[in-house]
Amino acid sequence: MKIGEVGLLSNDVVKLADFYKTFLGIDNGSNDEVHQTLIAEETMLTIYNDNSVKRNDNQNICLAFTVADIDEEYNKLMKLGVEIIEKPTTRPWGVRNMSFYDPDNNIIYLRSFIK
């Protein structure tokens, strides 16, 4: 069994999708206000409005991405004006990681492996 899709439910699909398009450096060619697929590989990332009101106080889920250069990503995120939870920090177990909130207050973790 494989995870086929991670979906983020949002009141504002366009705003959240635009953030992830910039953050991930991709363009899906869509401005759909109801559903957008951003990553269509083995595990898809979609943003979807199911017509229920979201409170954007997510406390039980997070997304984690492995990146090549966490400091470069941190600088990019600062330019996007995101709220940083924890700045890039080197951990004793061989990774450098950080965390931030996306526009819907989902917690996002980034990590890069120290070479």
Image (spheres, helix red, strand yellow):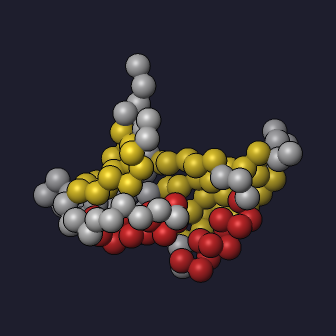
Identify which residue, 99 or 5, lies in the foreground.
5
Residue 87, x across and y down, in percent: 70, 65
Query: Residue 63 or 41: which is nearer the viewer?
Result: 41
Query: Does any portion of residue 93 appear in the rendered image?
Result: yes
On the image, the x and y values in percent for residue 54 come to 25, 60
Q: Residue at x 73, y 58 (%)?
A: 69
Q: Residue at x 71, y 53 (%)?
A: 68
Where residue 16 appears, as percent x and y from the top left, is: 36, 66
Q: Nearer the viewer, residue 110 or 99?
A: 110
Q: Give the left or right position of residue 95, taking residue 21 as reference.
A: right
Q: Quadrant of residue 61?
A: top left
Residue reaching furthest to the top = 1
**Quarter the N terminus occupies:** top left
Going by the image, does 6 lie left or right of 51?
A: right
Compared to 94, does 11 lie above or below? Answer: below
Residue at 71% x, 59% y: name it: 70
Q: Which residue lies furthest to the left in this view?
A: 51
Task: In this rendered view, identify the residue nearer to me: 26 or 99.
Answer: 26
Quarter residue 84 falls in: bottom right
- Residue 65 lies, in percent from the top left, at 58, 49
